[in-house]
Image (tube, rainbow, N blue to C red):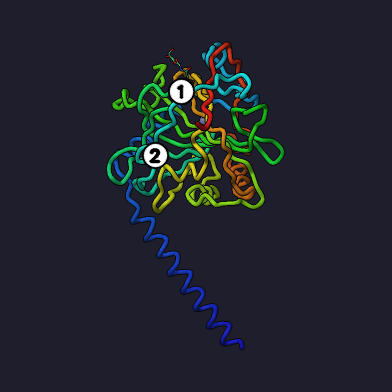
């Protein structure tokens, strides 16, 4: 009895050792392209340049354009006040192609952020159609969320706020040789896709791409921590199986300082489901002051007579 349990311990230790070596081996094998690392650095630099803002007052204390701008985001989206009209659907290109792997997931103190590399065929995932003034390439994805007792989407739809809002940030191919920060100086520089998530106890269908990302969240709890999401992932997997034919579109801004008014927004009406226990992982992240990074959404902004369009299924 005694001997056999000792033997069991020995085998277990050996197994753990092999497992540790295996992980070390995997880590060592991960190679990120120089272009991808440069894109991550540029994204970090832009984040640093935007200053040391926080969400203590949901952005009401942010200055400059965030204070004075007339085309700010997020806004309340309501069907009754929208111009319901014939709009082309959003066309997705290379959204079904595997991205160059692995992806780096970073806690930048304001959100969980992933810079998106090109796909394995060397092209970028991109979109056009809708009310987009051109074609826009996918650059990064991040999330806004609430807390155990509040919902954290940025836009509201028909007076309802959702648990989480995902933003896929795209840059106009007109500015292919400029950074996202540089493109944000132009009214047609950026296009953001907004996707709402509802916390559910039991998801009807699992978005495996998103789950693989969320499963890495416990590894980026401290401010500025990063990890890799290995394996094959497509930009399309972020969207899961939401209906993309119904959406709101309007001209607005970045929802973080400097709140540049450079974004054509497309916010899908369909709401994706995400298990509550996955969403809870977001609430554990920490911001730069080592406090919980929760409620990282900006307060609703004035519409100021801007037209808001709605595409219905045709
Ligand atoms: C990830 O974090 C480590 C440790 O802080 C850092 O050395 C590395 O540059 C980061 N990697 C990326 C891709 O940002
Ligand atoms: C956004 O602004 C541009 C330039 O003023 C305008 O041409 C375009 O129609 C606007 N788009 C939307 C969705 O309001
Ligand atoms: Zn955002």
Question: What is the crowding at mark 1: few (fewer than 14 residues within 10 Å), some, or many (at least 20)?
Answer: many
Dot label at residue 116: 2
Q: Is residue 1 above or below residue 207?
A: below
Q: Residue furthest right?
A: 149
In front here: 246 or 43? 246
| In front of the other: 73 or 33 | 73
298 relative to 286, above or below: above
* C-alpha separation, residue under disc 2 versus residue under disc 1: 19 Å
Earlier-in-chain disc, 2 versus 1: 2
Q: Identify which residue is drawn at 35% across, 27% down.
A: 135
Q: Position of residue 204 (x, y in %)?
A: 60, 51
Front residue of this view, candidates 111 and 144: 144
Q: Is residue 287 visible?
A: no
Q: Residue at x 45, y 67 (%)?
A: 19
Q: Callout 1: helix, strand or loop?
A: strand
Q: Is residue 4 above or below residue 131?
A: below
In the rendered image, residue 262, in percent from the top left (x then y), is placed at 44, 19
- Whether residue 244 is visible, yes or no, is yes
Query: Which residue appears at 59% of the width and 15% of the height?
Result: 303
Which residue lies at the image location 47% right of the left edge and 49% below the top edge?
A: 209
Instruction: Tell me which corner region of the image, top left, top right, bottom left or bottom right, holds residue 35.
Output: top left
Residue 82 location, x and y as percent?
A: 58, 20
Q: Which quarter of the figure is the N terminus placed in?
A: bottom right
Rendering quadrant holding ligand 1 = top left
> Does mark 1 have its CB less than 8 Å from ligand 2?
yes
Q: Secondary structure at mark 2?
A: loop
Which-is-in-front pick, marks 2 and 1? 1
Front residue of 308/147: it is: 308
Say which mark, if any, is on residue 264.
1
């Amino acid at each position: 009895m005694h001997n056999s349990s000792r033997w069991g311990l020995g085998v277990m230790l050996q197994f753990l050792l092999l497992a540790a070596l295996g992980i070390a081996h995997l880590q060592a094998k991960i190679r990120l392209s120089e272009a991808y690392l440069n894109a991550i650095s540029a994204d970090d630099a832009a984040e640093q340049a935007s200053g040391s803002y926080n969400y203590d007052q949901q952005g009401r204390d942010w200055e400059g354009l965030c204070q004075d701008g007339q085309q700010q985001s997020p806004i309340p989206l309501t069907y009754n006040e929208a111009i319901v009209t014939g709009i082309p659907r959003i066309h997705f290109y290379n959204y079904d192609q595997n991205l160059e792997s692995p992806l780096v997931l970073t806690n930048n103190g304001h959100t969980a952020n992933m810079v998106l590399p090109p796909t394995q065929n060397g092209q970028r995932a991109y979109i056009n159609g809708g009310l987009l003034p051109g074609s826009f390439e996918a650059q990064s994805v991040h999330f806004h969320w609430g807390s155990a007792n509040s919902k954290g989407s940025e836009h509201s739809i028909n007076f309802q706020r959702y648990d989480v809002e995902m933003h896929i940030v795209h840059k106009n191919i007109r500015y292919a040789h400029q950074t996202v920060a540089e493109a944000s100086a132009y009214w047609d520089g950026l296009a953001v896709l907004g996707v709402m998530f509802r916390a559910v106890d039991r998801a009807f269908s699992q978005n495996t791409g998103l789950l693989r990302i969320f499963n890495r969240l416990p590894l980026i709890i401290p401010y500025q921590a990063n990890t890799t999401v290995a394996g094959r992932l497509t930009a399309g997997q972020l969207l899961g199986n939401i209906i993309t034919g119904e959406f709101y579109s309007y001209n607005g801004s970045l929802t973080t300082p400097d709140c540049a008014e450079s974004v054509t927004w497309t916010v899908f009406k369909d709401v994706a489901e995400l298990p509550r226990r996955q969403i809870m992982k977001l609430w554990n992240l920490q911001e730069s002051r080592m406090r919980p990074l929760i409620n990282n959404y900006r307060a609703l902004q004035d519409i100021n007579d801007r037209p808001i369009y709605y595409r219905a299924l045709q």
